[in-house]
Image (tube, helix red, strand yellow):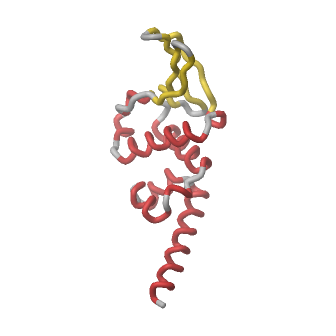
Amino acid sequence: MRTLIRQILNEQKKEKFLNDINQMGLFDFMKITGLSYVKVFQLVGDDLFTRKIMTKFIKDVINEYGPFGLVEIDEDPIFYNSSGDEFREISYLGKEKVSIDVYHGNNNLGDFHVYYPNLNDNYIEEIFDVLIKAYQNGKLDNI
């Protein structure tokens, strides 16, 4: 009986945390509660982090720290795609869009921008993972 009650209370806590995260965003939730991402992950599970939550976290981080290049947080650019001898990588995170560098061999041909809503879920998740890691390791404080 105690196990069932504990399980029900844990589910209610999980639902409350998810509601709070959906309302205020993961970034503010972590700041206000002082919980690390690892603890939030343990309480809620990352499978419930929707694209909306991840995108809001990305935008909240950029609003807090300003736009920056991934090299500024000691991260490699994120592979975007390639065709023939060209390859593209996400190198810069702006408020509304990412900057994608285009290379042919070792030559940088320039860049183009893609708005966050136009990025597929995999890119949003990769950017989210990079920012969570940088946030947890305090690397954002150095930009």
**In the figure, is residue 141 to the left or right of 4?**
left
Q: Position of residue 121 (x, y in %)?
A: 59, 41
Which residue: 62% across, 48% down? 52
Compared to 70, does 22 lie above or below? below
Camera-side residue of 51 and 87: 87
Q: Residue at x 57, y 33 (%)?
A: 95
Q: Reply above or below: 28 against 138.
A: below
Counting from the top left corner in percent of width and height, residue 143 is at: 38, 33
Q: Residue furthest bottom?
A: 1
Within the image, what quadrant is residue 38 found in? bottom left
- Picture mark count: 0
Q: Is 37 positioned to the left or the right of 113 in the image?
A: left
Q: Nearer the viewer, residue 123 or 91?
A: 123
- Vertical side of 138 occupied by 67: above or below: above
**Is 88 located above or below residue 31 in the figure?**
above
Residue 3 versus residue 9: which sits nearer the camera? 3
Which residue is farthest front? 84
Q: Residue at x 42, y 10 (%)?
A: 106
Q: Residue at x 66, y 33 (%)?
A: 118
For this view, does 38 lie left or right of residue 15?
left
- Residue 21: percent from left, percent from top: 55, 58
Q: Position of residue 20 (x, y in %)?
A: 56, 62
Q: Is residue 58 left or right of residue 114?
A: left
